[in-house]
Amino acid sequence: MYELFWSPGAANFAPHAMLEEIGAPFELIRVDMKAGGHKTPEYLKLNPHGRVPTLIVDGAPMFEAAAICMLLAERHPEARLAPAPGTRARVLYLQWLTYLTNTLQERFMQYFHPEAHVDDPACEAALEAGAEKRIGAMFDRIDAALAAEGPYLAGAEFSAADLFLAMLVRYSRGLANPAWTRPHVKRCVDLVAARPAFQRMLTAEGLTFPQ
């Protein structure tokens, strides 16, 4: 039994979809972030960064959404959420999942929380605008890569990387040029959104996709 600490639409989006894909027993434990539930002493013992998600694995907590996705794919190979080692698909899977969490998601952090990155409030608007511009360029690169080797990030194979991409595509809904306006990104996330497990995750979190 896994336990996933979550908040609607937060970075638990991809790990939650992973759990639905896997089909292993899990419990959802909602964290009321508006009420500061992620900053309570009890929660900080599980995740000292005060973020969601946190996954309880074999009785111990684990954080970082991408790491949780990789672990679940590794523990449940029968779900085929990570391509086999030694293949081109595996190369692409590792490359893009790392890019999404390390590069694109970080830009979203700057866009949504500029105050956490600069000390001068007068700089916040410029940082937000710059982050939006760079996010757009990153989605352009992803679209080009999907055009070349898609329909999924790992090529012909659906993987955890596509669930992570879908999460960040939803993050883009407030941008002037949302990610799904790019044809190959849209094709990929439309395929993801059609999966029954993904739909179960959306229903459980009370979300629509992509907006």
Image: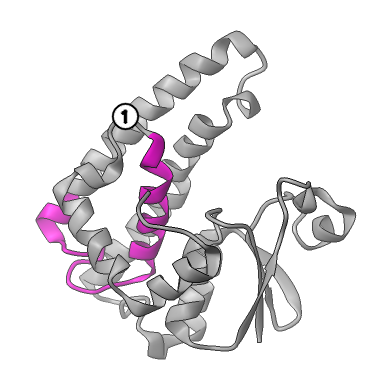
Q: Residues within 10 Å of mark 1 (few under 14, many from 20)?
A: few
Residue 100 seen in render: yes
Amino acid type indicated by mark 1: Ala
Extreme-top residue of the structure: 122
95 or 205: nearer the viewer? 205
Magenta stretch, residue numbers: 145-174
Q: Quadrant of residue 2?
A: bottom right
Q: Which residue is mark 1?
A: 176
User: Please, what secondary structure does the residue beneath circle 1 have?
Assistant: loop
What colouring does the structure picture have? one colour
Q: How many marks?
A: 1
Q: Quadrant of residue 46?
A: bottom right
**Is 108 placed left or right of 62 in the picture?**
left
Residue 69 seen in render: no
Extreme-right residue of the structure: 41
Q: Which SS does the magenta portion mostly show?
A: helix
Residue appearing at x 27%, y 33% in the figure: 177
Is residue 146 a member of the stretch shown in magenta?
yes
Is residue 113 a member of the stretch shown in magenta?
no
Residue appearing at x 38%, y 41% in the figure: 172
Residue appearing at x 61%, y 26% in the figure: 117
83 or 10: nearer the viewer? 10
Residue 141 placement (x, y as % from top left): 22, 42
- Identify the image quadrant of the N terminus: bottom right
Task: Answer above or below: position of 5 versus 197.
Answer: above
Residue appearing at x 23%, y 67% in the figure: 191
148 or 24: nearer the viewer? 24
Residue 196 placement (x, y as % from top left): 35, 79
**Is 137 placed left or right of 102 in the picture?**
left
Task: Answer above or below: position of 23 versus 4.
Answer: below
